């Protein structure tokens, strides 16, 4: 981005902007660290939840097969209760996947990418202000 740095007439003004940019970059680096950790945690969680859900689905299928061949009685009732518990587990896993699954992971990765671009822009801004300081210092030296 082109900044209106020609409006800066003193090195002191430039130093104020450099201080502001340094603080902003420090804040962005903290956000970056936090986003990296969150992204890593979401990645692990998404993988784990998907595996757990697949296991529960297989167990539900097996339990349904067992229920279909059992005669009425206590064993069949136990299998039906087990299936109900498994269906609840499936529901809770699906709910967690909505919050911590692949979609949430991609959102966190997008956040991290945005922070990285902001850090790059802070570096560009700092370099532009430092260039302006050089220009102002050259004017003072030649006067």
Image (cartoon, helix red, strand yellow):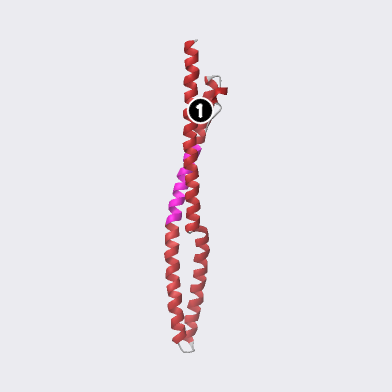
Question: Element under label 1?
Answer: helix
Query: Residue 61: x percent and y percent?
Result: 45, 77
From this view, report whether residue 122 is shown above or below residue 62. above
| Viewer-proximal residue among 54 and 6 | 6
Magenta portion: prevailing SS class? helix
Label 1: few (<14), some or many (≥20) within 10 Å?
A: some
| Outermost residue, top side | 143
Query: Residue 74: x percent and y percent?
Result: 48, 86
Query: Residue 8: x percent and y percent?
Result: 56, 22
Magenta stretch in the rendered image = 26-43
- Label 1 belongs to which residue? 18
From this view, report whether residue 88 is shown above or below residue 41. below
| Outermost residue, right side | 7
Residue drawn 45% across the image and 44% down it = 33
From this view, report whether residue 68 is shown above or below residue 42. below
**Does residue 21 show up magenta in the picture?**
no
Query: Residue 102: x percent and y percent?
Result: 47, 58
**Does residue 27 show up magenta in the picture?**
yes
Residue drawn 48% across the image and 17% down it = 137
Q: How many marks?
A: 1
Residue drawn 48% across the image and 19% down it = 135
Residue drawn 47% across the image and 32% down it = 124
| Viewer-proximal residue among 1 and 115 | 1
């Amino acid at each position: 981005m082109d900044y209106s740095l020609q409006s800066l007439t003193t090195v002191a003004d430039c130093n104020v902007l450099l201080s502001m940019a340094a603080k902003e970059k420090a804040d962005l680096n903290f956000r970056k660290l936090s986003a990296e950790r969150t992204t890593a945690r979401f990645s692990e969680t998404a993988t784990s939840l998907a595996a757990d859900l697949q296991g529960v689905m297989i167990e539900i299928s097996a339990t349904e097969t067992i229920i279909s061949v059992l005669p009425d009685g206590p064993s069949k009732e136990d299998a039906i209760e087990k299936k109900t518990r498994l269906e609840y587990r499936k529901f809770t896993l699906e709910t967690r996947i909505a919050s911590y699954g692949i979609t949430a992971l991609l959102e966190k990765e997008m956040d991290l990418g945005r922070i990285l671009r902001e850090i790059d822009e802070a570096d560009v801004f700092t370099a532009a202000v430092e260039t302006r300081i050089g220009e102002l210092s050259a004017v003072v030296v030649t006067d």
